[in-house]
Each structure stands twice: as C-alpha cells, then as structure tokens.
Image: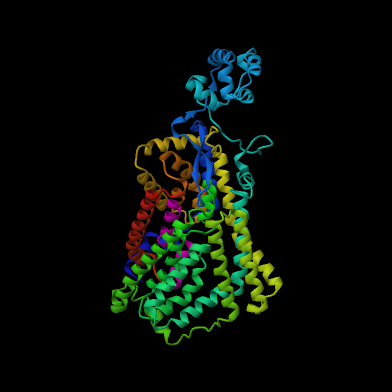
Amino acid sequence: MTKKSKTQQKNGRDFTKIRTPHTYAIIFVVVLICWVLTFIIPAGKFSVHEIEYKDSNGEVKTKTVLMADTFRYSYNLNTDFLSVKLKDLSNDAEALQQIGVDQKALKEFVKTDPKTWDQSKLDDLGLTDDVLYEKYGRSIYDTSKKLHKTANVWGTDDFNGFGFMNYVFEGLVTGDKYGSAVGIVALILVVGGSFGIIMKTGAIDAGIHAFIRKTRGLERLALPLLFFIFSLGGATFGMSEEVIPFAIIMVPFVIALGYDSIVAVTVTFVASQVGNAASWMSPFSVAIAQGIAGIPVLSGATFRLIMWFIITALSAVYMMAYAEKIRKKPELSVVYNNDEYFRNRIENVTEEEMKFTLGHKLILLEMLAVLIWIIWGVTAKSYYIPEIASQFFVMGFAAGVIAVIFKLNNMTINDMASSFQKGVADLAGTAIVVGMAKGILLVLGGSDANVPSALNTVLYGVGNALRGVPAVVGAWSMYIFQSLFNLVVTSNSGQAALTMPIMAPLSDIVGVPRQIAVLAYQLGAGFLDAFTPVSASLVGVLGVARIDWSKWAKFQIKMQAFFFLLGTIAIIIAVSVGLQ
C-alpha cells in the first residue's frame, strides 16, 4: 500500500468512495430550499413582447421574450390613483380604442367601489397589468408592501391550490407533446425502449469487438478511431455506464499495444464524456436542457455537429500525444506499477471471440441511416418531439426485426417486447427528473416572466450583477458555473433540472440566446464527468483499470484544463455567430 493510500485511510478520506446523494434527494432538497426562499424573496414580474427571427429554414417566426428593463415587484393596486385615472380614461374614446377597451364597460366599472377592485377584474376589461404599467408606470401600485407568491404545503392546481409536496405530479403533467414536461418524458421513454432492443441484439458489442480485433498492429490509427466511436456513443445516446464492460476488454488490449491503463480509460470513458459535452442530439442532455429552456428540441444541431467533430478530433490528438510518450518510455506512466498486473496476465488471457455477423452489420447500418435521417429531419424539415420519437422507435423496431430474422442472441418477438420494456424501465428515472425540473419552476412561481414569481426576482438580481458585461462574459460565467456544479451533481438530466430553470431566462436578461445557455450547460456538465470522484461511472471504469482516483486526477487535471480551453473557445464562437 502506498504512503498516500495509508494517509487517506488514516484520515478516513478515500475520495474514490465518496457517495453522492441521489439526484432525487438533491432535487427534493432544492425544492424545499426554493419553497423557503419564496417566503423571503418577494415576487416580481417583467413585461413581455413578441420578436421576429428567422429559423433554420429562413422562415420568419415570432417568440415571446421578456423586456429586461420592465421589472417590478408584485404590489397591491393603488386604487386611489387608479380611480382618478380610469375615470379620466373612460372619457377618452380614442385612447380606449387604441388599447382595445370597451368605453361603456369601463364607465360602468368606475362607478363601483374602488376598494373592491383587483387585477382580475381589470383584466376582464382589457386593462391588464402590462397595459396599466405602460400607461401610468409604477404609480398604479401601492408600494408600501412587496407581495410574496408561496405555494401551499399540499394541494393541486384545481384543488386547494398548488402545493410543493405535489411537485413531481404537477411537473410531469405540464405542457403537451410538443414540449416539457409531457413531450420530453414521452421522448425519453421511447428512446430508452428502442435502445433496449438494440443493446439486446448484441450488434454494438459485436461491432466494437470486431473493430478491436481487426485493428491490431494499427494502434496509431485504431486508438483515434476508437476515441471517435466512443465519443459518438456519448453524443448519440449518452453513453456512460455502458463503457464499463468495454473497459474490461480495452484495458488489457491497450496495455498489450504498449500503452497504459490511463490511455485505455481515456479512449473509452473520457471519449464518451467528450461526446456528451459536445453532443448535437443526445436525448438525455441536450434535448432535456432545450426542452426546459423552451427552445426547439435538438435545434442548433449544425453548430454542435461541427463542434463535436472538432473537439473530438483535438481531444484524440491530445490523447495520442500522451499515448506516444508512454509507448516510447512506459516508465513515465504514473500507473506503470499498477499495470504490471495486466502485463503479467496478457500472455495467459485470450480474447473471447465474438462473431460479427451479417445481421450485426445490417443493424449498425440501419442505426447509421436512422441517425442521418434524424439529423436531416431536424435541420431540414424542422422535425420536433413527436417526429423524433417516431424515428427512434423505427430504429429500435427495425433492429429487432433484423435480429429475429438472423436469430441474433436467439432473439424472438417476445424478446423484442421485453427488451423494449427493460429499456423504458432503465430510463424511467431520467424521465421523472424532467417532471421534477418543472416542479422546481412551479414552486418558484412558474417560468412565465409575465406572472409574478420569486424566480423573476432572482433573475432580476443576478441579471443586475451581470448587467453591462459583454455577452461573451455572461455566457462564459454560465459555463464556469455549470462546470463547478458538475463536480457535485454528475447526472446530466439532474443538472439540467437544477440549473436550466434559472440559466435559460437569465440568458434573456444578460443578452445571450438561450441556445448558448444550453451550450454552456452541456459543456460544463460533460467534461467534468471525466474528472469528478463522485461519478459512479468514472469510479467503476477506474476500478476495472485498477487505477486510484488520485493518480487519475494527476493526469486528468491537465486534460481538464485543455477541455476548459476548448469549451471557452466554443462559447466565444457561439456568441460571435449569435447561435440560435
């Protein structure tokens, strides 16, 4: 045992065995904190307006955004002031026509007792809070007391009012099939079922095994290609825990080629997290974050696809620079002594044969075709959640049919159904997180900038702190925050649930497109997963490779600095081109 390991045991601090609280537990604590904050932070709101923009097809669309300079706290109405002003307004037919208020109805209204007036009655006349504020300013309010918007302990929207103890259900049933939470939840479950069928066919396993076998002696080409393959897995279906069984094969294989176990972990797990960070289509990170942010799911795919290729290529170059240094002088590796275990066993351990059949090849080709179809549909035809879900289902169903025809893993129709069920079950927990994300918003008063809430007040405060800074500084600050947050919460979906409800509307205030707020989230949530000791997937892969986290950190801290530089450059470019 090393001196460092003895010291860790003596102090009772083994960082590789730190247990992170469950994502659900973290979110529930956040819900409680948010609920308490609503007692402390008064509610506020913004006025909103419609803006025009061009989509990826060049078509003009409109979107409702907040007006950062219109924030005001929630107050009771100053009925004394309004009784005078509305009486005058009732005699101004031209002004009433401009704002769309019926003159006769207003004349009848001003005859009633002003003490009975409230905003809902004014809304019925067409005199909304925004209309009155634009016309008379803050004078319409009694500013002696700021109001709070705090949820009940228990209840529903249609019975007793929303209660925070019902945040999961209320969050899950919000929205429709075109957005969060219902649409995103359905998409995640369908995707999970489809990949459940695909994994059952064994095509992915067989393909990687075949690749490893056929590239012996071509390691300088094989390792970068493997890096791209695992990065593609992270980018397309959030590959993470799935890396562990491949690491069992890759570690002795890479060491046999003259490298070390750090290279093996880098070409597998780190590559998958690079894919996660730069993904253009992952339904478990990008799609969730975009759904919460209220922007089209899988939009901005062209920019992200280019970014993924460049970041993956540069990361592979970084890995090969280290790998070649170790190949030339293995003793330089911090895990040289650890790898002796694998070097001693290599001659006695034979690689298990796995046939790469025609059926496997057809499934992988079919997957590639569908992935291209999805990219084309999103970028060229503006496919949205229902279409994307259908495409993923076709991918899984077609793979299952091929497996049945070619008897892959002796697959039957019933196996297809049970595999789909298992895939859905595996991602049900992730789907619940989406509902929880909406629940956080509901507890904070909702995400509507035009409705008084504590969230709007928080955004106004943070926005003031960042007000005046260049857009690139605001975006970069978001990236730093997301990176630090990922040191504690390693679940991509969990981090999206906890941060995007704040980051998305904050980007409106700072003057950064919400698409860039999502980009800052995914880069921060992806890269640090390859470093933090509380990542169950990372610790699992390191366990397979027999690497202490402290030794891994000594290598990875330099690579993280490289990743941070790449992320910073990506953020700067995104701001420069106005990524939407």
Magenta residue check for 524: yes
Task: Say which of 137 and 144 sits in front.
Answer: 137
- Residue at image point 44% right, 43% down: 507
Relative depth, front residue between 53 and 143: 53
The N terminus, quarter of image: bottom left
Q: Residue at x 40, y 79 (%)?
A: 341
Examine the rendering and report whether any part of residue 532 can be seen. Answer: no
Up the image or down, 12 lies above or below 140; here it is: below
Tell me which segment is drawn in magenta. Answer: 519-544
Q: In this view, does 337 lie to the left or right of 104?
A: left
> Residue 442 at what x, y percent from top left?
57, 40
Nearer to us in this view, 21 or 183: 183
**Residue 183 in the image, given as x and y percentages of width and height:** 62, 51
Q: Position of residue 285 (x, y in %)?
A: 51, 56
**Left or right: 164 as drawn, with respect to 235:** right
Residue at x-position 67% and y-position 34%: 160
- The tally of labels here is 0
Residue 2 in view: yes
Magenta span has 541?
yes
Residue 215 lies, in percent from the top left, at 43, 81
| Majority secondary structure in the magenta region | helix
Q: Is residue 569 left or right of residue 434?
A: left
137 to 112, vertically: above or below:
below
